[in-house]
Image (tube, grey):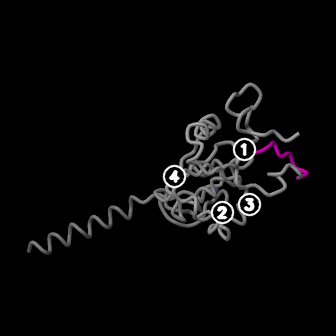
Amino acid sequence: MKTILILVFCAAYVIVSAQAKEYVCTPCGSACDKTVHTKPGACPTCHMKLVEKAAILFENLTTDAFCKRITENPNGVLILDVRTKSEFEGTSLRTTYGYFKNALNINVEDLEARMGELTKYKDKEVLVYCSQSIRSPRAAMMLTQNGFQTVKNMSGGVSTLRVDGNECLMRNFVVHK
Ligand SMILES: [Zn+2]
């Protein structure tokens, strides 16, 4: 009798927790990232795969908080720029804004393949950015899935930075001329 009761409770628990699962689209920085779905599938807006909300383990920081992490923890952070090489270097025909000093540049499209290069930074706090925070949330998600424990994404991306008059940014961000 007791065993049956335990089994019933276990089954009920499994059903309840399965129903409680929440899904969101693979983070791309669009407004639909915030819509919570109750079943897996694809996002009706951006058509990206829905992932379990609980699997999204990175934090979004404002541009000021992002810069502050660099000054507070200079040797403990890896700054990762996931734009293209030409955006990073300022040779792209697009507006390129600039880059954070000491940032490592790996295009988000190459990140999965080049993940091995980041193994030596596994204990560091990873600060990820791009130009509009569309590519960087995707990169941040990949990093957490590959075992990086502390991953932070810059909301808005470098296109939203106001460097003039911002002491932290003037020290840490190089504006492309
Ligand atoms: Zn979506």
**In this rendering, the label closer to the viewer, 2 or 1:** 1
Magenta segment, prevailing SS (helix, strand or loop): loop
Disc 4/disc 3 C-alpha distance (Å):
20 Å
Look at mark 3 in the image and give the residue it sits on: 107
Q: Position of residue 62 (x, y in %)?
A: 61, 38
Look at mark 1 in the image and give the residue it sits on: 100
Residue at the spot x=60%, y=43% of the render? 74
Dot 2: what SS?
A: loop
The reply to whether the C-beta atoms of the residues labelled 2 and 1 are less than 8 Å apart is no
Region in magenta: 92-100
Disc 2/disc 4 C-alpha distance (Å):
28 Å
Callout 2 amino acid: His
Disc 2/disc 3 C-alpha distance (Å):
22 Å
Ligand 1 within 8 angstroms of badge 2 C-beta:
yes
Q: Position of residue 147 (x, y in %)?
A: 51, 63
Look at mark 4 in the image and give the residue it sits on: 150
Ligand 1 within 8 angstroms of badge 3 C-beta:
no
Look at mark 2 in the image and give the residue it sits on: 47
Residue sitting at the far front: 75
Q: Position of residue 157 (x, y in %)?
A: 70, 44
